[in-house]
Image: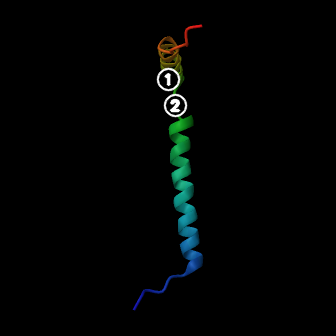
């Protein structure tokens, strides 16, 4: 026979897990040093520039 589950406790357990997951994402997103942020921004600019240079425009 199946194990009985208290739905209230299951909901709370799921809510805690979701909160923990969100906290981990926020730590990764916002818990960075200024050097990390500037390095990431420079990489994004470099990547954008590389993509723009490779863009093919139709001959008019």
10 up-or-down from 38: above or below: below
Residue 15 placement, left or right of 3: right
Q: Looking at this view, is 34 or 7 the one in front? A: 7
Q: Nearer the viewer, residue 58 or 39?
A: 58
Say the numbered circle drawn on residue 4: none
Instruction: Point out residue 56 in the picture as x, y percentages from the top left corner.
Output: 50, 14
Q: Give x and y (percent) for residue 12.
A: 58, 69
Would you name the residue on which mark 2 appears? 32
Q: Position of residue 17 (x, y in %)?
A: 52, 60
| Residue found at the far bottom of this picture | 1
Quarter of the image with the C terminus is: top right
| Residue in the image at 49% along x and 24% along y | 36
Total number of numbered discs in the rendering: 2
Residue placed furthest toward the left: 1
Q: Secondary structure at mark 1?
A: helix
Say whether marks 1 and 2 touch (CB < 8 Å): yes
Q: CA distance from mark 1 to mark 2?
A: 10 Å
**Tag nearer the camera, 1 or 2:** 1
Q: In this view, which residue lies farthest toward the front?
A: 60
According to the image, label 1 marks what residue?
40
Residue located 58% across and 63% down the image: 15
- On the image, the x and y values in percent for residue 24 come to 50, 47
Q: Is residue 43 above or below residue 6?
A: above
Q: Secondary structure at mark 2?
A: loop
Q: Earlier in the sequence, mark 1 or mark 2?
A: 2
Q: Mark 2: few, some, or many residues within 10 Å (few <14, many ≥20)?
A: few
What is the image's colouring?
rainbow
Which residue is found at the position 50% from the left and 39% from the top?
28
């Amino acid at each position: 026979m199946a194990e009985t589950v208290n739905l209230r406790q299951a909901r709370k357990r799921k809510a805690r897990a979701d909160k923990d997951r969100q906290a981990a994402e926020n730590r990764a997103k916002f818990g960075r040093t200024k050097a990390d942020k500037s390095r990431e921004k420079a990489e994004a600019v470099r990547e954008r520039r590389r993509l723009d240079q490779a863009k093919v425009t139709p001959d008019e």
